[in-house]
Amino acid sequence: MIKLLLASLVAVSLIQAKELNTQMQEFMNTLKVEAKKDNPNFTKFDYARGEKIFTTEHIGKKGELISCVSCHTSNLSNKGRNEHTNKVIEPLSPSANAKRFTNVKDVKKWLRRNFNDVYNREGTAQEKGDVVTYIINKG
Ligand code: HEC
């Protein structure tokens, strides 16, 4: 029964994340299982919730107003600029930058760091899944 449930979860995630490589699909699937564990009413990751996470400003560690947009801009096909170091950041959208969302280790590392920059805490599984769903579908 559990095997069947897992198999159907994998099948659903394959349909929703068909442009992601296997490694990333597995990551998204792990987030989905965790999100469901945290919240039994969770059904799927949501673009609109992800957009809100990406665009809403919060007070950062230095008392500054900061959002994901501050460094990545609101056009994810454009280059951004790191608010803290002033270094150029290549586009976040996988349609503009083929390297994006190909290496799970990088994605995990930067989600952890960037959620901390903006929200002063790590994102939940649902928040991470929502924001990735937003970024990969916005184009
Ligand atoms: C202070 C600047 C800054 C802020 C704010 C910021 N980021 Fe980033 N982000 C970076 C940098 C720097 C990198 C790593 C350099 C690179 O990958 O080009 C990065 C990389 C990423 C990656 C890695 C993508 C990949 O495939 O490697 C993701 C995903 C990401 N950011 C999402 C977010 C989200 C979501 C937020 C808001 C919660 C956010 N970022 C806020 C600077 C920032």
Image (cartoon, rainbow, N blue to C red):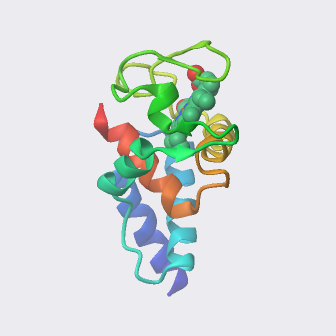
The image quadrant of residue 30 is bottom right
Task: Determine the residue located farthest toward the front in the rendered image.
Answer: 63
Splitting the image into four quadrants, where does ligand 1 fall? Answer: top right
Q: Nearer the viewer, residue 112 or 15?
A: 112
The image quadrant of residue 114 is top right
Q: Residue at x 37, y 73 (%)?
A: 43
Total count of labels: 0
Residue 27: horizontal and vertical position, in percent? 57, 52
> Is residue 86 something that shows in the picture?
yes
Q: Nearer the viewer, residue 121 or 104?
A: 121
Say left or right for 93 vs 82: left
Residue 2: horizontal and vertical position, in percent? 54, 83
Q: Residue at x 50, y 87 (%)?
A: 1
Where's the C terminus, which quadrant?
top left
Residue 84: horizontal and vertical position, in percent? 65, 23
> Is residue 17 something that shows in the picture?
no
Q: Residue at x 65, y 44 (%)?
A: 108
Q: Residue at x 62, y 12 (%)?
A: 87
Residue 24: horizontal and vertical position, in percent? 53, 44
Relative to 25, say whether 137 is above or below. above
